[in-house]
Image (spheres, rainbow, N blue to C red):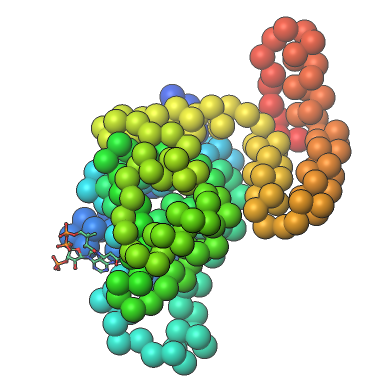
Amino acid sequence: AKAPEMIKVERVGAKKSVALITLNRPKALNALCKQLMAELATSLKELDNDNQVGCIILTGSQRAFAAGADIKEMVDKKFPEVFGGSFLEEWNAVSSTRKPIIAAVNGFALGGGNELAMMCDIIYAGDKAIFGQPEVNIGTIPGAGGTQRWSRFGNKSMAMEVCLTGNKISAQEAKEAGIVSKIFPADKLVEEAIKTGEKISDQSPLIVQMVKEAVNAAYETTLKQGLQEERRLFHATFATNDRKEGMTAFAEKRPPNWTST
Ligand code: CO8
């Protein structure tokens, strides 16, 4: 396969168990054009199937995580093409990744850039990060989850405000709105994300996948269905060796040795 041009993929952490994907289209502030999203989709699929990798981190530059979908690429598109075509197809790869993804956001996370961050499982922000859904300013609306994920993950009042006005908000405001879990100094952000990624990678990959699926159920189904799914997955842990090993190791006061079986 052709090497990616608009993203950089590295293995990081003491055990090289974390994949770090850096969006790397600096001249366009990481605007998410078709090629970039296709490269991201391909690499996420590869990493999802790589047993050495337990967690994925997605980051941009200090100036921009991503300034949105590529406006110049969209300007001449017409309805039949975007409705009938495969426009946005590559984006599905992000939310269908089974392994946890941490978005480490420095600089602008706007429009599709913020939507991309919200498709990830954890959002850490640098202290100068800026979030927003400015689509209304260019005569369109968010199309990759901005109105939906923001409202469910954060709160409706702030979702309405950012989507209706196009106003940008700070890392602190995004944290208060429930979109971001932690804020770090911009130059420490990626290393902090790697530390969390290593901690996740040290868990049983099998169980980690069940955790992700269970938490996502809270945002994708009713409470009744979510509780049912959680209970079934909890029961399913008893079909794994890692559940037995984890509890045995606790009782024997030793660290567990996961086999992902
Ligand atoms: N698309 C294409 N090019 C972009 C984008 C973008 N979203 N954002 C920035 N650029 C380019 C600029 O055109 C400029 O290029 P050039 O040097 O060739 O003129 C370069 O990046 C640097 O940008 P600026 O000179 O504007 O830098 P500033 O520091 O002055 O401003 C901003 C930075 C505030 C981020 C400003 O660039 C901006 O407002 N960008 C657009 C933000 C925006 O509206 N994003 C939403 C896009 S729509 C969207 O995401 C819909 C998503 C729908 C689902 C996904 C569909 C695929």
Residue 21 locus on image (x, y percent): 39, 47
> Relative to the observer, which residue lies in front, 71 or 259?
71
Q: Quadrant of the C terminus?
A: top right
Residue 254 locus on image (x, y percent): 69, 10
Reply above or below: 165 against 251: below
Residue 148 locus on image (x, y percent): 55, 62
Residue 99 locus on image (x, y percent): 58, 45
Reply above or below: 130 against 205: below
Question: Residue shown at 30%/36% (left/top)?
Answer: 127
> Relative to the observer, which residue lies in front, 158 or 94?
158
Q: Quadrant of residue 126?
A: top left
Question: Residue shown at 52%/49% (left/top)?
Answer: 154
Q: Quadrant of residue 54?
A: top right
Question: Residue shown at 53%/51% (left/top)?
Answer: 155
> Relative to the observer, which residue lies in front, 102 or 44?
102
Badge count: 0
> Relative to the observer, which residue lies in front, 120 or 223?
223
Q: Is residue 121 visible?
A: yes
Q: Quadrant of residue 96?
A: bottom right
Question: Residue shown at 49%/80% (left/top)?
Answer: 86
Q: Is residue 109 visible?
A: no
